[in-house]
């Protein structure tokens, strides 16, 4: 096990000790986009099916796969013990009974773990403790090795946006333009770890619904690409800007939302400091939108890592304090009262002692072609 993986286990076990857990089961599934949690603690990337990393408070961790997943990934990359079982939940349950575990934490209890495995764990006897928030907080501060992976993902994401920008023209289809960016993402090692969409509407505004970039979606004079990728290191990032055709007349709401976006960008630089709560950061960056009469239809931001959306979220009432080294995706989803206009631009930020650092070099603006 390398030093980086040992660091991750130490952080997770510290969180386990704080909550008096005898063991933790970390769920990952390629089917739901939650594969990164397993990679985070084992080095193995799920190509198909699902898996669990079992972390005892004392003893060696192991990653457990369903039997049919023996050849749907590069198992030589795993840095911890591996086990295969027809019903992985029964395997973990047997280990719990044999070890006498009383409190068993589960990451992925609500969204990832199949019902059949939960029932097996429940029948084994230990108290099942949901551990999604605690696990994400334990991995929220990135190491230098992780930050190198994050910055590489940002490099790829930003270049993909530039390719989208270079390919875009009114009258081209969303699929035609996005495919050029996707081709680059795959060539750079993202594989299937991309989730790229568009928000379109008329020549002067975009509507708030996210759309798959299909061939029947003909782009007008204004488009909002939504680009989310993870590079070879499997750290997700989100970087995009609005795009318009030169000479396009943007709606008055779009122009006013852009003013608020510029205010948000400056506010994030100042407010994104260690010790500031997620609630206070949300308040600082959202005030310009709310004062202009717009509401936010998507979370203002969230922690991001090997899973695309991690805790904490940047939102009202979230009192978690920021720590230096956290990486946040910020994307205020500003929506007009009529619903007939929105502005949505993404940036990945690093929390530093001196304030927020945007990790791309793209200016906050509407890019005109």
Image: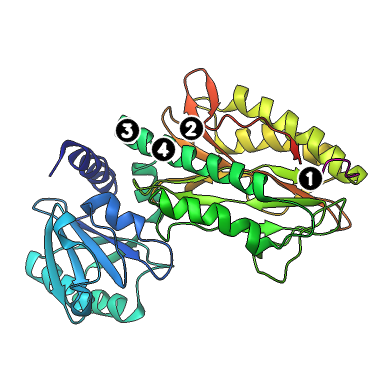
Question: Residue at 68% of width from left, 34% of height from top?
Answer: 285
Q: Which of marks 3 and 4 is in front?
A: 4
Q: Which of marks 1 and 2 is in front?
A: 1
Among numbered discs 1 and 4, the one appearing first in the sequence: 4
Image quadrant in which the N terminus is located: top left
The crowding category of the residue bearing disc 1, from other C-alpha atoms within 10 Å (few below 14, some 14 to 19, many at least 20), is many
Tell me the CA gap for discs 1 and 4. Answer: 27 Å
Q: What is the secondary structure assignment of the residue under circle 3?
A: loop
Tags 1 and 3 touching, CB below 8 Å: no
Q: 315 left or right of 365?
A: left
- Write down the residue under mark 1: 244
Among numbered discs 1 and 3, the one appearing first in the sequence: 3
Tags 4 and 2 touching, CB below 8 Å: no
The crowding category of the residue bearing disc 2, from other C-alpha atoms within 10 Å (few below 14, some 14 to 19, many at least 20), is many
> In front: 354, or 117?
354
Magenta portion: prevailing SS class: loop
Q: Where is residue 321 in the image (x, y as percent from the top left)?
A: 49, 34
Tell me the CA gap for discs 1 and 3. Answer: 38 Å
**Tag of residue 322:** 2
Tell me the CA gap for discs 4 and 2. Answer: 23 Å
Q: What stretch is highlighted in magenta?
A: 244-249
Question: Residue at 48% of width from left, 31% of height from top?
Answer: 350
Q: Is residue 272 above or below residue 330?
A: above
- How many numbered discs sit on the rendered protein? 4
Q: 232 left or right of 246?
A: left
Among numbered discs 3 and 4, the one appearing first in the sequence: 3
Q: Where is residue 143 in the image (x, y as percent from the top left)?
A: 32, 33
In reply to whether residue 192 is colored magenta, the answer given is no
Among numbered discs 4 and 2, the one appearing first in the sequence: 4
């Amino acid at each position: 096990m390398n030093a980086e993986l040992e660091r991750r286990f130490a952080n997770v076990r510290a969180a386990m000790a704080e909550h008096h857990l005898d063991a933790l089961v970390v769920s990952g599934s390629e089917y739901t986009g939650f594969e990164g949690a397993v990679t985070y603690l084992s080095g193995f990337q799920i190509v198909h099916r699902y898996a669990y990393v079992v972390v005892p408070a004392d003893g060696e961790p192991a990653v457990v796969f369903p039997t049919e997943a023996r050849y749907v990934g590069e198992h030589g990359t795993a840095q911890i013990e591996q086990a295969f079982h027809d019903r992985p939940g029964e395997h973990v349950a047997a280990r719990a009974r044999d070890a006498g575990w009383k409190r068993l934490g589960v990451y992925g209890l609500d969204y990832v773990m199949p019902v059949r495995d939960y029932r097996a764990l429940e029948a084994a006897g230990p108290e099942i403790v949901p551990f999604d928030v605690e696990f994400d907080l334990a991995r929220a501060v990135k190491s230098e090795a992780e930050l190198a992976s994050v910055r590489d993902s940002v490099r790829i994401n930003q270049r993909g946006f530039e390719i989208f920008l270079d390919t875009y023209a009114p009258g081209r289809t969303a699929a035609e333009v996005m495919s050029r960016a996707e081709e680059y993402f795959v060539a750079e090692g993202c594989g299937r770890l991309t989730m790229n969409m568009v928000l379109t509407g008329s020549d002067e505004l975009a509507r708030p619904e996210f759309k798959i970039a299909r061939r029947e979606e003909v782009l007008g004079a204004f488009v909002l690409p939504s680009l989310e990728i993870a590079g070879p290191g499997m750290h997700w990032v989100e970087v995009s800007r609005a795009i318009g055709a030169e000479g396009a007349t943007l709606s008055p709401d779009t122009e006013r939302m852009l003013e608020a976006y510029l205010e948000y960008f400056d506010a994030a630089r100042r407010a994104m400091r260690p010790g500031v709560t997620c609630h206070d950061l949300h308040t600082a960056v959202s005030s310009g939108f709310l004062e202009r009469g717009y509401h936010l239809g998507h979370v203002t931001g969230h922690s991001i890592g090997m899973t695309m959306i991690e805790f904490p979220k940047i939102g009202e009432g979230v009192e978690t304090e920021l720590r230096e080294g956290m990486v946040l995706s910020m994307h205020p989803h500003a929506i007009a009262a009529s619903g007939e206009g929105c502005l949505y631009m993404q940036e990945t930020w690093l929390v530093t002692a001196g304030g927020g650092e945007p990790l791309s070099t793209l200016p906050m603006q509407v890019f005109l072609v």
